[in-house]
Amino acid sequence: MSLFDWFADRRKGQFVGKVIQETDEGDGLWGKCPECGQVVYRKDLIANANVCSNCGHHNRIDSEERINLIADEGSFHALDQDLSPTDPLGFKDRRAYADRLRESQANTGMKDGVITGFCKVESISLALGVMDFRFMGGSMGSVVGEKITRLIEGATAKKAPLLIVCASGGARMQEGMLSLMQMAKISGALERHREAELLYMPLLTHPTTGGVTASFAMLGDLILAEPKALIGFAGRRVIEQTLREKLPDNFQTAEYLQEHGFVDTIVPRPQLKKTLCSLLKLHGYLPDKQKD
Amino acid sequence: MARRYLLEFEKPLVELEKQIEQIRELARDSEVDVSQQLLQLETLAARRREEIFQGLTPAQKIQVARHPHRPSTLDFIQMFCDDWVELHGDRTGSDDQALIGGIGRIGERSVLLLGQQKGRDTKENVARNFGMATPGGYRKALRLMEHADRFKLPIISFIDTPGAYAGLLAEEQGQGEAIAVNLREMFRLRVPVVATVIGEGGSGGALGIGVADRLLMFEHSVYTVASPEACASILWRDAAKAPEAAAALKITGPDLLNLGVVDEVLKEPAGGNNWAPLKAGEVLKEALERHLDELTKMSIQQLREGRYRKFRSIGRVLDPTTSETGLSA
């Protein structure tokens, strides 16, 4: 924002001094960083890819915002947008799975928890999948598995490099074993992509856990992660409860994984597009000359 | 008398067995001929056992699947192989005792056998880590499978684990990565792979050795995406709802056959595999040889394409472009 905007908003009579506690909702002009407490101007925050300029805290962003950060403007073409979940087990816990699905669909405007498609990153073709944590915790059911598998198969056919932005609590229990088997299905498709000597990079964002970690999140030729993202196989509470082990403070953070050799590079979000572009070019993927 | 480990729902059988035992003792001490009565009671006991085991709920099946005397990976290997050499180590610094493997011969065929190994008692279970493999276990499994691939040995995998080990060291050593790499690399194998859930198949820890051309399951085995206890505490916010979760998750052989996850469900003796382990061994051996006969006739290309298609087709989605529910491949 500029000072000019600030005055313009002020003239509209809006109250600008109010501190909004929740940074990821509401439409206030100001927000408070949940990490350092700094009051930040929302436009600044958005301009900085939702990263706090004071402490570097990465606020959660949804799949659409993520695509906007990565893809050249207007270049993203979504695939399989209408693929919808079913309720194969007729699952009901305290609430019916069908109701939970409807609610998530209404809240997000998505059919299920991942957007897939092809795009250009500074004119370089890229197959892109973005999981959305808002949709039932980014859990992986049949639709997520199917859309990602189709994306990978498409990338293999078009000889395109692949980026999957992971954000998931793991398997979608409401789809039972069908959900677990998506791990194998996606890994099989990745094997073919790899066999074709194409570059695959997962980007691990907060949080990446469970079945996603034990499949495509860890199968990258290069594994990228966002600062401080929680990445792990088992939940911290499970480990603490069952084993009574003292866990280090940075346990299961991106930094911890990098220290132990499972993450190639940690990329702050404002540098994401630039880093991606460098990596693609360094692997010989070049900008398309002709426009489509 | 009751040396055997009893499950809650087996209790009605205890009375009958006590009676049978008493009559036997009586017969030993006297000259009375009780064979008629014995036969009658034994038939009755067998019928009751059959009835009870026919009607097991998913939660009860979990108990059978976790029965400490249920035949384990090493039990089956001992039953199948005259010639067996266990092989150790992941070649990166560890030898997991919860996931074992080696080469043996079944009939005329040299095969690689591997699987999770639980213990029978507390002491053995501590050594075996309750059948929960570490990243080193999965890497050892992969090393052995790659060995089998090089020497053209079919792979027989036994699944029997509550899940992959969840601990500080396991996370540090990359539990997720170890399983993930197995999932991918098993699609590359040029030899037949037959996996069988012999006890409990716990989530990713089971799948880590479960990418197979054929997936078999015993009648009272279970295969779960998350343990019903964990599922209940997450979705119901109450771990005591585990039986409900067990039913809702569709974890039994017949359910998974319907969902297209499992290829064949193997019949168990009444009373479960622990009741007649040798019989269970015969059933499994027959099935394994039958599937291997079919699979070894296939070309490498057919085998790998078939394995890919098998997993590719799992899942239920609604696809308006084909206006089709169900299989989406």
Image: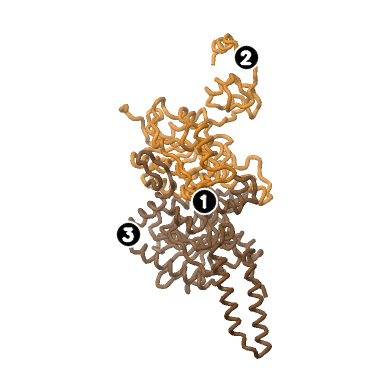
Chain colours: A orange, B brown
Secondary structure under tag 2 reads loop
Q: Give a yes or no on whether discs 3 and 1 share a subunit.
A: yes
Give the camera-side residue of A267 and A6. A6
Residue identified by numbered label 3: B299
Residue B279 rendering spot, x and y as whole percentages = 50, 72
Q: CA distance from mark 1 to mark 2?
A: 54 Å
Q: CA distance from mark 3 to mark 1?
A: 29 Å
Looking at this view, is B175 or A151 the one in front? A151
Amino acid type indicated by mark 2: Phe
Quadrant of the image containing the N terminus of chain B? bottom right
Amino acid type of disc 3? Ser
Asked if A171 appears above or below B260 in the picture, the reply is above
Q: Residue furthest bottom?
A: B31
Could one spot residue A281 in this view of the protein? Answer: no
Residue A24 x, y percent position in the rendering:
58, 28
Residue A199 place in picture, x, y as percent: 41, 40
Q: Of the numbered discs in the image, which one, if any, rests on residue A15?
A: 2
Q: Is residue B44 visible?
A: yes
Q: Which mark is residue B178?
A: 1
Lateral position of residue B25 relative to residue B56, left or right: right
Q: Position of residue A151 (x, y in %)?
A: 40, 40
Query: Answer yes or no: do the residues labelled 1 and 2 have beta carbons within 8 Å?
Result: no
Q: Nearer the viewer, residue A206 or B87?
A: A206
Identify the element where label 1 is drawn.
Answer: helix
Name the residue furthest left.
Answer: A290
